[in-house]
Each structure stands twice: as C-alpha cells, then as structure tokens.
Image: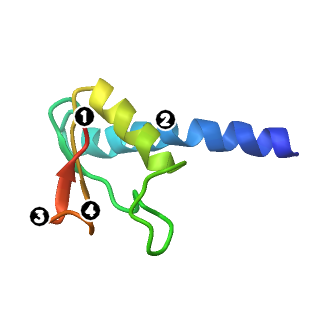
Amino acid sequence: MVQLARQINTSMPLYVVRRAEQALARHDQLLRGANVLLLGVTYKADVAGTHESPAVAVARELLRRGVYVAYPDPMSQSGVSMVL
C-alpha cells in the first residue's frame, strides 16, 4: 500500500503538467511559451522553504517544456520570484 502511494505521489507532478497542457489546448494555446504562476509552492504554514515541495518537480518539468514559471514568495521584497 505504501509503495503504491509513493508511485502515485511521484507521478503527480507530470500529471499536473499534462493537465495544464490539456487545459491550454482546449483554448488553442500551447504550453511552450506560456506564463504559469504556481501557487502553494511553500505548502507548510509559516515556512518559506520549498523543501520536499512537489511544486518544485512541477516547475522543473514546466521549465523543461519551455514555460515561463513564477511563484509568489511572501519572503521576497517584490512578492514574486522567478523559478530558475
């Protein structure tokens, strides 16, 4: 059971990227070149770090596919930081 849960959790970032791609396609838009704002990157309350955040894997896959990715960072001066 635990192994199945791990497999599902590991596959979720790619699933999320595919869903985003499908949503854009329904509006005749491409994923490559799209601007995406990720929310919930720092999912632990009062913690600015992204340690073990599944959003990091989502961001990496989006970047690999040519997407411009940003996320709100409550600890930065501007409030928004680019994911590199």
Q: Secondary structure at mark 1?
A: loop
Instruction: Determine the secondary structure under disc 4.
Output: loop
Mark-to-mark CA distance, 3 and 2: 29 Å
Q: CA distance from mark 4 to mark 1?
A: 23 Å
Q: Badge 1, how many Cα within 10 Å: few under 14, some, many 20+?
A: many
Q: In the rendered image, which residue does mark 3 sit on?
A: 78
Which amino acid, mark 2?
Leu
Q: Are marks 3 and 4 in contact (CB under 8 Å)?
A: no
Question: Residue 19 appears at what percent x and percent y?
Answer: 42, 43
Q: Where residue 8 sits: x, y (%)?
A: 68, 41
Amino acid at circle 4? Asp
Residue corresponding to mark 1:
31
Given the image, on which type of amino acid does mark 1 rest? Leu
Between circles 3 and 1, the one closer to the viewer is 3
Counting other residues with Cα less than 10 Å from the Cα at mark 4, is it few (<14), some (14-19), or many (20 or more)? some
Quarter of the view holding residue 32: top left
Residue at mark 3 to residue at mark 4: CA–CA distance = 8 Å
Q: Residues within 10 Å of mark 2 (few under 14, many from 20)?
A: some
In the image, what residue occupies the spot 47% across and 64% down?
43
| SS state under label 2 | helix
- Which of the numbered marks, if any, corresponds to residue 14? 2
Please give the name of the residue rendered at 27% of the width and 38% of the height, measured from the top-left corner.
25
Closer mark to the observer between disc 1 and disc 2 = 2
Mark earlier in primary sequence (1, 2) = 2
Mark 3 lies on a secondary structure that is loop
Classify the position of the N terminus by image quarter: top right
Mark 4 / mark 1, whichever is N-terminal = 1
Q: Which mark is residue 73?
A: 4
Q: Earlier in the sequence, mark 3 or mark 1?
A: 1
Circle nearer the N terminus (3, 4): 4
Q: Which residue ends up furthest to the right in the rendered image?
A: 1
